[in-house]
Image (spheres, rainbow, N blue to C red):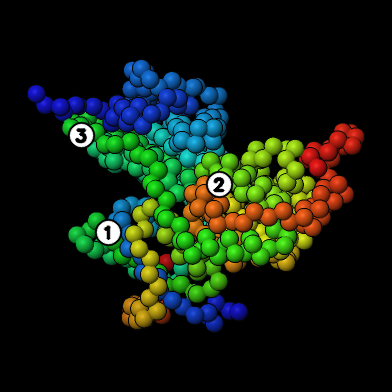
Amino acid sequence: MKPSALKRIVLELTVNNHPGVMSHVVGLFSRRAYNVEGILGLPVAGGDISRIWLLINEDERLPQMIKQFEKLHDVKRVAQRPGERELFDQLEALVSPGICNEK
Amino acid sequence: MSNVERLTGAQLVIRLLERQGVRVIAGIPGSANLPLYDALSSSLTIRHVLTRTEQGAGFIAQGMARASRQPAVCFATSGPGATNLLTAIADAKLDSIPVVAITGQVAYASIGTDAFQEVDTYGLSLPITKHNYLVRSAAELVHILPQAFQIAASGRPGPVLIDIPRDVQLETVAIEHWPEPGIATTPPAVDAALLQEAARLVAEAERPILYLGGGVIQSGAAAVAREILERCGLPTVTTLHALGVLPVDHPLWLGMLGMHGAPCANRAMDESDLLIVVGARFDDRATGKLAEFCPHARVIHIDIDPAELDKLRASHVAISGEADAVLQQLQPLLEPSARQPWLARVRQLKADWPLRLPGAANRDMIGV
């Protein structure tokens, strides 16, 4: 199956906000050769915690990924958000077609 | 009179390790962890073991942790000291051994400048530790040290690395309140309905096999496991990490399973109709081709780590819990059973497919 044929979903993570947390999160993907299609992150609640939204292709590894997130000490909560695709759809509108040729 | 003590970060680390009950540290000094060694030299209770390479220090800590079932500590300096530790730390992660590795790092302001003996120890250790820290101030050590021990020992144990920049080791802080030592958190309660369901599967099984892993040793469940397997007539296979749960001449023991195991163990598993897996993770050296592993068996899987349940083999009953606690609660629900036909078949398999060493003529490695 081509990646484009897979259903895309959004995972919402609530994490401690300090340097290194994003590495822990994306490390779980890279070590499984599982691509992250989109990342959005913001500090919340005064900056002690952050929320990260990950746009990923849904495949059979997803349940294991969620269990692994729950084991990370800095991850407070993991939720699957089927309705939050619009966040990334809006961001996509910001990306102009010529942006890939800037370097 | 105030109880405030003024200490350097390094003195604080040593004091916290003393309060934690640490009595031996293996390691090697270097420029980035010299303040820690300076503070260690004043300790009356902690003995240092100087190794020839940091990897040896990591494995000494592993050995102490395996033998005591308590977290053990190793020290290394920055750069090559930290990289030499990595194999021992990765091994502790895969084997679920509680090790606390404390590494020196270049001064905080120099991080990211490619300073002398600087490597990204946090980044290198990230995928091979249960958790890791880059300490940014001496004050943080008061909660990081006990938390590191708690994380290492809780749930499925594992290694934790604390990377401490040299200037943080030298920074002075005032300590008024000392934290409690970090200890393992209490595992969550086991679902009684799942235990009933597991007991029902055991009662229904005609050809059950008990498959024991490292979690049995780690949680001290060998005694209750033995009571259960003897009462219910369960032929038992063990992984490498569960060797020692049963004496080699125990009539119900079939040896180690898998690629390096006994032929009789693998043949009995192939015929079994129920696998009771305790503190094991269906490692590929144990299972071989997963699709062909125990093709007729239903599975009861008991493991402290929920991520191991249904990871490689779907289970009919999955129980997340500490092996000893789960088996203690399961034991009264299990009916005594002789299982004569199955035990006779297993005796035959042991006679036909024994584990023999070349040259050790007719001397079976596993008692029949």
- The amino acid marked with disc number 3 is His
Q: Quadrant of residue A91?
A: bottom left
Look at the numbered disc 3 and give the secondary structure of its residue: loop
Circle 2/circle 3 CB separation < 8 Å:
no
Which mark is in front, 1 or 3? 3
Residue bearing the label numbered 2 = B215
Label 3 lies in what chain?
B
Percent of width and height locating residue A96: 37, 79
Residue bearing the label numbered 3 = B177
Q: Is residue B179 above or below residue B10?
A: below
Residue bearing the label numbered 1 = A49
- The amino acid marked with disc number 1 is Ile
Look at the numbered disc 1 and give the secondary structure of its residue: strand
Q: Residue at x 20, y 34 (%)?
A: B177
Percent of width and height locating residue B229: 65, 49
Percent of width and height locating residue B318: 54, 62
Q: Residue at x 29, y 41 (%)?
A: B143
